[in-house]
Image (cartoon, rainbow, N blue to C red):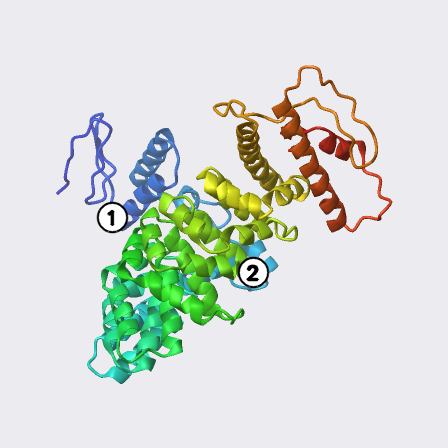
């Protein structure tokens, strides 16, 4: 019995074969395979054509199912085969590429596979490294001292050049057991722990703060102050740790107030004659780091280190570092007082001004003397007695730009003091500073008269002018001698003007 279906577009009846059609919208379909029909619909929908084309293909399929199929000719192509071929999804073929590649695998696929394999290998490697670090931390927490010493040595090697290992080991809790190892009596264990802590703090401020917070500074000082004096290797390791930890600003006051400064000064005195010793340089650098904090200047003064540092300026190997420390010390009133009372401080600092082969030392020494010159009249007198005037004049000619500016500042202060002194001796007005006159008359060392105006010049100004000219002439002779110039050297007009004029404005700065 046939089945009927109502549809506005047209009905397709799957049932017994019958070509009969009822009405305008009823059709009786012949027997048609359901699989074949679904295949045609799928092909029509997947061909990517427009909806109009799909509707046309649907009408042709329905029409093809109604009429009886003719016997397939051998020489013609049927509509069904055309539909099947046109509706089948196009498959990408690469015959040309295969011929070009000659059967080689696709390079892009190989590259992606290689990257994926490398990524997996790298991940595996990182996981294994992390597991190894965890085992290392567990060994540090063991009770056996030998295992801890071996683990500390391993930490020292791993953190020497690897910043990631420093961060990871610190996060895993390596610092507390290493600090606890400083209580061991075995010096080898102490050294292993000290250098492991040193490497953990390199370039990592968080680790530096964590090491100090764990009590490492107090344990190091405890080793130093113990009845059994530590070995030189342990002392050197402690100095190196103080250097690294003092680089962090928040640690400077903690280390300075803990008593580390006397130990550093003691180390400097012990290694005074060993110029190539690394511990000596480390102690100076640590002392410089601590001197940056003004709160530590008092501890430096209490350690009685200023006389030692001043006397050590003669060693060119460490002189600039010492001058850097004194430049920080002189910034406070108590520091200036300590330098002022140090024996032979000013003669030594004035001598440094003549080191033309070390501009850095000249600049730092002139800075110290400049601050001291503004401090007290007694200090200025000590500078003059040490022969600072000639050194400053030479510095204004041969020194660096910064050294010249600082030298001119000191000369200005000394010139005002000289004017006051002469004015007081001649009974003049001592309340006003007498500056050097611009006009005057004298015969210079080259036998030529200086044409000047003397009409309005007072007696005190004449005296000041004469003193300044004599000082300039004497200092110019010294400069010529130090430059190893020939005896028949004829000075330039510029140099003559320096001796002919007594004002500081003629100085070349």
Q: Nearer the viewer, residue 138 or 84?
A: 138
Residue in the picture at 27% in, 71% down: 178
Q: Residue at x 48, y 43 (%)?
A: 379
Q: Residue furthest right?
A: 488
What residue is rendered at 75% in x and 21% in y?
452
48, 393: nearer the viewer: 393
Q: Which residue is mark 1?
A: 34
Can residue 165 be seen here?
A: no
Q: Secondary structure at mark 2?
A: helix
At a point 45% along the width and 51% down the height, the residue shown is: 326
**Residue 192, percent from left and from top:** 34, 76
Which quarter of the figure is the N terminus placed in? top left
- Against 90, is 241 above or below? below
Would residue 385 appear left or right of 505 to someone viewing this image? Answer: left
| Residue 322 at x, y percent in the picture | 48, 56
Res. 154 visible in picture: yes
Residue 252 relative to residue 501: left or right: left
Res. 376 image quadrant: top left
Please give the residue where the numbered disc 2 appears in the rendered image: 314
Q: Give the image quarter of residue 242.
A: bottom left
Disc 2 to disc 1, C-alpha distance: 110 Å
């Amino acid at each position: 019995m046939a089945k009927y279906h109502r549809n506005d577009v047209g009905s397709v009846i799957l049932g017994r074969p019958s070509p009969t059609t009822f009405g305008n919208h009823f059709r009786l379909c012949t027997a048609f395979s359901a699989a074949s029909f679904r295949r045609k619909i799928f092909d029509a929908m997947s061909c990517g054509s427009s909806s109009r084309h799909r509707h046309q293909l649907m009408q042709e399929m329905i029409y093809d199912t109604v009429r009886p199929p003719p016997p397939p000719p051998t020489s013609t192509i049927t509509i069904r085969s055309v539909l099947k071929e046109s509706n089948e999804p196009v498959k990408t073929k690469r015959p040309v590429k295969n011929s070009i590649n000659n059967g080689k695998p696709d390079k892009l696929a190989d590259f992606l596979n290689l990257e994926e394999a490398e990524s997996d290998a790298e991940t595996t490697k990182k996981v294994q490294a992390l597991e190894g670090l965890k085992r290392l931390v567990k060994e540090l927490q063991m009770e056996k001292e030998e295992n801890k010493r071996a683990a500390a040595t391993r930490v020292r090697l791993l953190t020497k050049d690897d910043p990631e290992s420093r961060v990871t080991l610190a996060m895993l809790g390596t610092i507390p057991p290493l600090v606890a190892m400083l209580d061991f009596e075995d010096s080898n264990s102490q050294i292993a722990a000290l250098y492991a802590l040193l490497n953990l703090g390199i370039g990592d401020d968080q680790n530096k703060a964590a090491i100090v917070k764990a009590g490492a500074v107090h344990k190091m000082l405890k080793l130093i102050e113990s009845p059994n004096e530590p070995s030189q290797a342990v002392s050197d390791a402690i100095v190196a740790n103080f250097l690294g930890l003092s680089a962090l600003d928040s640690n400077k006051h903690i280390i300075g107030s803990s008593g580390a400064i006397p130990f550093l000064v003691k180390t400097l005195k012990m290694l005074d004659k060993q110029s190539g010793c690394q511990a000596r340089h480390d102690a100076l650098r640590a002392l410089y780091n601590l001197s940056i904090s003004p709160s530590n200047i008092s501890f430096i003064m209490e350690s009685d280190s200023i006389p030692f540092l001043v006397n050590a300026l003669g060693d060119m190997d460490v002189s600039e570092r010492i001058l850097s420390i004194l430049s920080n010390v002189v910034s406070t009133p108590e520091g200036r007082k300590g330098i002022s009372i140090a024996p032979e401080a000013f003669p030594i600092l004035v001598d440094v001004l003549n080191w033309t082969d070390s501009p850095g030392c000249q600049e730092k020494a002139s800075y110290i003397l400049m601050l001291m010159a503004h401090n007290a009249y007694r200090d200025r007198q000590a500078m003059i007695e040490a022969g600072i005037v000639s050194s400053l004049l030479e510095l204004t000619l041969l020194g660096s730009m910064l050294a010249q500016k600082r030298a001119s500042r000191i000369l200005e202060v000394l010139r005002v003091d000289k004017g006051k002194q002469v004015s007081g001796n001649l009974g003049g007005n001592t309340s006003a500073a007498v500056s050097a006159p611009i006009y005057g008359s004298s015969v210079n060392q080259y036998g030529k008269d200086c044409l000047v105006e003397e009409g309005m010049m007072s007696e005190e100004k004449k005296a000041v002018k004469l003193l300044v000219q004599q000082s300039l002439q004497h200092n110019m002779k010294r400069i010529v001698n130090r430059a190893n110039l020939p005896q028949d050297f004829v000075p330039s007009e510029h140099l003559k003007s320096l001796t002919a004029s007594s004002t500081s404005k003629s100085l070349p700065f």
